Image (cartoon, rainbow, N blue to C red):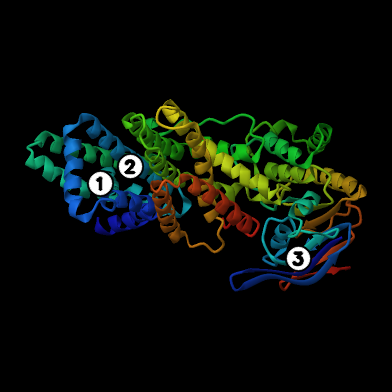
Amino acid sequence: MRELLYVLIKSLAVPFYKRHAGVLLFVFFLMFGIVESSQIVEYHFALIGGMLNSEVFFAIVLAVWTLYSLKALHFLISTIRQEPYNFLHHLSVLPVGFGFLLFFTASAFIFLPVIIYTIFIYSVAFQNHYYTIIIFIVLFQASLCSINGWVLTRLLHTASLPPFITVPSFTLPHLKSQFSFYIGYIFKEGKTSLLLSKMFSLTLLYIIRETLEPGDDFRIIGLTWVFVLLSHTFLVQRLKIFEDQHLAWIRGFPISFGRTFVMYVQLYGLLMLPELMLITASLWRDIFYYEYLLLPLYSGGLLTLVHTYLFKPDRNPERFTSYLFWLFMLCFMLVLGKLIVLVTVGVMVLSFILLRKRYRQYEAVV
Amino acid sequence: MLQLTNVTKAYGPRIVLDIRNLTIPQGTHWVQGGNGSGKTTLMRILAGINPFEGSVALNSIDLKKEPLAYRKQVSFAEAEPLYPGFLTGRNLVEFVQKIRNETNKGIQDLTDHFDISHFLPYKTGTYSSGMTKKLSILLALIGQTNLVLLDEPLITLESSFLPQLLNILNKRQAKGTSFLISSHQPFPDSFSVPTGKIIVKDQSAQLSNT
């Protein structure tokens, strides 16, 4: 059991943490880095107290855990389906129950940051005699890991996924331009990544929108937008892999650099359309039209900059997460300092310069 | 005329190509060389897909200095083409037609000659390797480019299609299009007399009259 679990954790859980280290570090910073150390305990007591006393807050926390679990499941499924992981199919000769236990434990390992934080929740709940909530949280988290364990065991034994876990795909008509190839890919092959990113960002934006009061600072939306964009960086990586594997031939066509740059900015700006539509209700109440118009440019520029990073020659893939962390940290601080216009112009100019420098010098390694 | 000057290509410390000076006159050339000799790398460099050191110019238009003008003159069919599986053949034909400014009649003629109209409405993910190969050659022949690069065009194609393909290439050659064709196979007799042969060997490439 120990040896098998070691291999599973090394092949599945460790790559998950490596791939999402930027996002996880960023969340960690927000949880423990923005409050002064002398107030950190009180801050978390207040946060947990709010969660235990408000049904809405509690439901939101459960929703975030579910999203995290779904994200992990999606990652595990796509990893197991890759050719280098074919060796995991040897596990299918083990008894089903044993296989389930292995995947359950691997899923729980991925859930570890949540489980560790939950220990603090238990202690606060215990002090306040909220025993039912403790039992509910234990069962809820165990169910999430069990579902993941069951889906992965089934995948290994039957090579199929349960219908409720598969997202129906559809092909867009009129795929005649380079831009539409990317959109087509997102809707066809990147649909689960898209769905998870959108679920996260739309939930977050909805909560913020509902708590906004007329006259509130635009920075609240600006800072939330940093998280919205961060949740889409996984999709940028997927698009780059798609581009390397299936669209390398386009580089031989007479398509100007300017057109290519505009295509990327358009693509990432339009990707934020659902989020923009969601906050349309806040127009003229909480935000002005010029601030609203800034958001797609800010999105297009920042995500294009992330895409441009992936064109870096001889890039060390391990450093991508730290790049993301520092880039989004910088954006967060600049937006906090009321410099969103500067951020927008900055990322746009920087992505243009870097893409111009790297695009023709890049060679896809498939 | 295609001019290569000090063209080098290396992957880390391994030098794959090192061509000091090579002038390829207009016409059709057969690019030959053993496995791993760098034929595909050379073709991808000439197509503007892979970066390299040095300079490549076609009819005095330098690939690095005038990337757009150069690419307007050159088209390329890969040895192992890979297209997004959710796109149909028609999607790809229309995409290239738009970029290369080809007329509907030109496209119709090509698809008729290639006899692929019946599978163009289907997704490329459902194509066999031969069908994908046919499509890639067709895409390379869309538009009026001066140089067409065909990397291993004869593999995976059904033998009954070869005379048709050579017929199309002969017609294009008569209109002034140059071809660089890489292949392990000998030159087919039915093809018009090639201008020459390019031997890729020992990281270099040179014209050969034999």
Q: Which residue position holds label 2? A: A68
Q: Nearer the viewer, residue B7 or B69?
A: B69
Residue A47 sits in quarter:
top left
Q: Amino acid at mark 1?
A: Val
Q: Which percent across, then down, holds residue A348? A: 55, 48
The residue that appears at 27% across and 39% down in the rendered structure is: A144
Gap between marks 2 and 3, in whole Å? Answer: 50 Å
Mark 1 lies on residue? A114
Q: Which residue position holds label 3?
A: B55
Badge 3 density bin: few <14, some 14–19, many ≥20, Cα 10 Å: some
Q: Quadrant of residue A355?
A: bottom right
Q: Nearer the viewer, residue A47 or B166?
A: A47
Evaluate if marks 2 and 1 touch, with contact meaning CB atoms under 8 Å apart. yes
Q: Residue at point 33% right, 54% down?
A: A8
Q: Position of residue B130 (x, y in %)?
A: 69, 44
User: Helix or strand or loop: what does disc 2 sit on?
Assistant: helix
Q: Residue at x 62, y 58 (%)?
A: A357
Q: Of label 2 and label 1, which has the lower sequence position?
A: 2
Disc 1 + disc 3, Cβ < 8 Å: no
Does dot 1 land on a helix, a strand or a loop?
A: helix
Near-viewer residue (A344 or B202)? A344
Give the answer, above or below, for where B188 lies relative to B208. Answer: above
Q: Is residue A165 above or below residue B183?
A: above
Marks 1/3: CA–CA distance: 56 Å
- Amino acid found under the numbered disc labelled 3: Ser
Q: Is residue A304 left or right of residue A178?
A: left
Left or right: residue A46 compared with residue A266: left
Badge 3 element: strand
Crowd around label 2: few <14 · some 14–19 · many ≥20 (10 Å)? some
